[in-house]
């Protein structure tokens, strides 16, 4: 049976998503994978969601906003013996980070989830399985715009199965965030990682550390924004910077090799994120990425990216992690 679904997110919920780096594209994709036939995104305060029918509704808002939404459906709200808010006719699911209650109301007509702000990404199976107890559909994730579902700058997805040739930029079929896939691959190979970052200013390490419990895999990161930092922190030869410039294969290779060793792999990036700073030879969006793996020759890649500064930085983070996945997988 076709299931129309809604994500109804308050301004507080949107702020929580933004702080966590999770886009509504991912939320939409995960719901489609759970079996929704269509997904719409609404801002709670707009009230537009009330004029659209849905079989599944997921509210992501502060508790007071959730209570108001529950009452709009005629649900009874009371305080229990501990003074905590309780939703009558709903059952509970305890979510973590922070520890909080997810209320689940189900009737013959619809299922409604009321979720307060906190981790919405890494516990998605816990609450989505309340809507669909069966297997999730394969969600194919790509680096680039191959898929018809836009996840975030540099990543897309599709539910369409690939029976024959799989595109080169294919990442996984489980709807995994790229940091989930990278950490899984590093653990599988018994590797830990370091990063040396210029234009991303620590964004690669920050992306990996969104995932809980990664201290066994992520060792450290250097933000070597200045030329002096590249020399002083990871031992880049200053003559390389003089001869080739900070944004070059030679320098980014030296950064990766300076940060890695026989125990740690290392990703390094150096580029021009803009809006200024570009030249005819190295326009804005020129980024060099290098990867050093223990016992292997360092590999590098030159990117030609476009977009606003934050989009170029985001795409660089994705491209660097894809380079690592290519090497590991």
Image: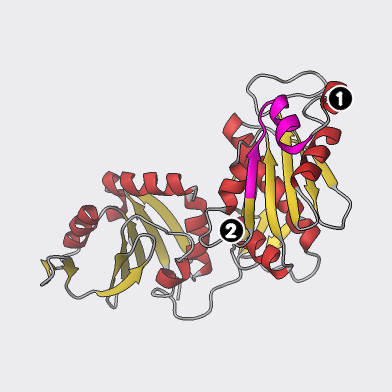
> What distance separates the C-alpha of mark 1 from that of mark 2?
39 Å
Which mark lies nearer to you, 1 or 2? 1
* Position in image of residue 225 (x %, y %): 66, 30
Of residues 17 and 98, which is closer to you in this image? 98
Q: In the rendered view, would you say 32 is above or below 155?
A: below
| Image coordinates for residue 56, horizontal then vertical, percent | 36, 67
Q: Quadrant of residue 39?
A: bottom left
Q: Residue at x 53, y 62 (%)?
A: 213
Left or right of 19 in this view: 183: right
- What residue span does the magenta drawing correspond to? 220-235
Element type where label 2 sits in the image: loop
Within-10-Å neighbours for mark 1: few <14, some 14–19, many 20+: few
Q: Decide if residue 44 is in sight here.
A: yes
Category of crowding for the residue at label 2, using alpha-carbon neighbours closer than 10 angstroms: few (below 14), some (14–19), many (at least 20): some
In this rendering, position of residue 19 left or right of residue 111 = right
Q: Residue at x 44, y 45 (%)?
A: 19
Is residue 238 depicted above or below 70 in this figure? Answer: above
Q: Is residue 301 magenta?
A: no
Q: Earlier in the sequence, mark 1 or mark 2?
A: 2
Viewer-proximal residue, 216 or 87? 216
In this orientation, does residue 284 appear?
no
Tell me, for residue 239, which label it has, or none. 1
Q: Which mark is residue 327?
A: none
Disc 2 marks which residue?
177
Q: Does residue 14 appear to the left or right of 200 in the view shown?
A: left
Which residue sits at x=68%, y=46%? 195
- The location of residue 85, given as percent across then percent down, is 16, 64
Determine the residue positioned at 57% across, 49% down: 207
State the SS at label 1. Answer: helix
- Quadrant showing the N terminus: bottom left
Residue situated furthest bottom in the rendering? 134
């Amino acid at each position: 049976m076709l299931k129309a679904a809604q994500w109804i997110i308050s301004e507080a919920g949107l702020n929580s998503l933004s702080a966590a780096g999770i886009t509504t594209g991912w939320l939409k994709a995960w719901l489609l994978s759970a079996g929704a036939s269509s997904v719409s995104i609404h801002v709670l305060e707009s009230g537009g969601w009330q004029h659209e029918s849905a079989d599944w509704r997921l509210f992501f808002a502060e508790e007071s906003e959730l209570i108001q939404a529950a009452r709009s459906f005629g649900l009874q709200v009371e305080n229990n013996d501990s003074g905590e808010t309780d939703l009558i006719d709903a059952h509970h699911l305890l979510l973590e980070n922070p520890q909080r209650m997810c209320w689940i109301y189900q009737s013959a007509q619809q299922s409604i989830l009321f979720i307060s702000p906190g981790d919405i990404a890494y516990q998605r199976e816990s609450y989505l399985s309340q809507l669909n107890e069966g297997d999730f559909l394969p969600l194919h994730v790509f680096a680039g715009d191959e898929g018809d579902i836009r996840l975030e700058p540099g990543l897309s997805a599709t539910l369409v199965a690939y029976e024959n040739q799989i595109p080169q930029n294919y990442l996984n079929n489980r709807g995994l965030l790229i940091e989930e896939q990278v950490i899984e691959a590093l653990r599988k190979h018994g590797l830990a990682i370091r990063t040396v970052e210029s234009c991303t200013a620590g964004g690669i390490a920050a992306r990996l550390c969104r995932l809980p419990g990664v201290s066994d895999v992520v060792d450290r990161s250097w933000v070597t924004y200045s030329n002096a930092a590249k020399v002083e922190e990871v031992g880049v030869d200053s003559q390389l910077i003089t001869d080739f410039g900070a944004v070059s294969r030679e320098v980014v290779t030296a950064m990766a090799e300076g940060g890695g060793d026989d125990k740690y792999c290392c990703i390094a990036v150096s580029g021009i994120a803009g809006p200024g700073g570009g030249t005819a030879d190295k326009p804005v969006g020129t980024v060099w990425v290098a990867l050093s793996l223990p016992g292997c020759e360092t590999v590098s890649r030159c990117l030609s990216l476009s977009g606003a500064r934050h989009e170029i930085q985001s795409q660089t983070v994705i491209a660097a992690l894809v380079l690592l996945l290519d090497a590991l997988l």
